[in-house]
Image: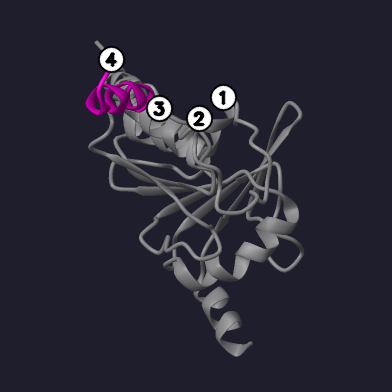
Amino acid sequence: MKPGLHDDAFAMSMPAVLTLVLAALLTLSGMPAFSQAEPARKPDVPYVPTPQPIVDKMLDMAKVGKNDVVYDLGCGDGRIVITAAKERGARGVGIDLNPQRIAEAKANAESAGVNDKVKFMVGDLFTADFSEASVVTLYLLPDVNRALRPQLWKQLKVGTRVVSHDFDMGPEWPPEKVERIGAKTLYYWTITSAHKKTLAER
């Protein structure tokens, strides 16, 4: 008996069916069915994780506690925000341009049991709203820090603490504290009314 039209249609549809089945199985297993999404644009800095002892020291410098909201700008795998939530009871938000880093951060938050205290989002630091922060952490590059400085002055409330790993904010904003740990340098600032006034006069 020759195969009919329905048989041909069935045979032709099998690859598509198999693809859909495979995608469903990968989704159920928690694996991505397709390649990770690419960033909307090239990130401003390479991904270099902050060592855990430096994370702890950054949070110490900012005196992070349970009433704080920590924003990590360029959060990578989320370790600063997650540590702030797990070890100090703070709430936190991580922002990164790279969707793959955000996926890792969300998975790490799940493993650490702090999903109720943290949030991670794909976003551009130069257009993101981080005005809620009481503490901001950074591990960017000197030119990115300086370009971001006006947004920090504009958005952040007076008294908000800012800590940067390895890079300062330029001569226009000298740090209030500098601490060195081996080859690493940490810089600390607070937002003041003078910053708001300087920005308003420009």
Relative to 124, does residue 67 appear above or below in the rendering? above
**Residue 41: image location, x then y, percent:** 61, 54
Residue 60, visible in the rendered structure: no
Mark 4 Cα shell of 10 Å, populated few (<14), some (14-19), many (≥20): few
The numbered mark, 1 or 3, whose residue comes first in the sequence reads: 3
Q: Which residue is mark 4?
A: 2
- Tag 3: residue type? Ala
Magenta residues (range): 2-16
Question: 9 or 106: which is nearer to us?
Answer: 9
**Alpha carbon of mark 2 to alpha carbon of mark 3: how far?**
36 Å
What residue sits 73% from the left and 26% below the top?
182
Mark 4: which amino acid? Lys
Q: Secondary structure at mark 4?
A: loop
**Which residue bears the numbered disc 1?**
53
- First in sequence: mark 2 vs mark 4: 4
Is the Cβ of the residue at disc 1 closer than 8 Å to that at disc 2? yes
Q: Which residue is mark 3?
A: 33
Q: Which quarter of the figure has residue 129?
A: bottom left
Tell me, yes or no, whether the highlighted magenta stretch contains residue 9. Answer: yes
Task: Identify the secondary structure beneath mark 3.
Answer: loop
Chief SS of the magenta region: helix
Disc marking residue 160: none
Q: Residue under label 2, please give it.
A: 56
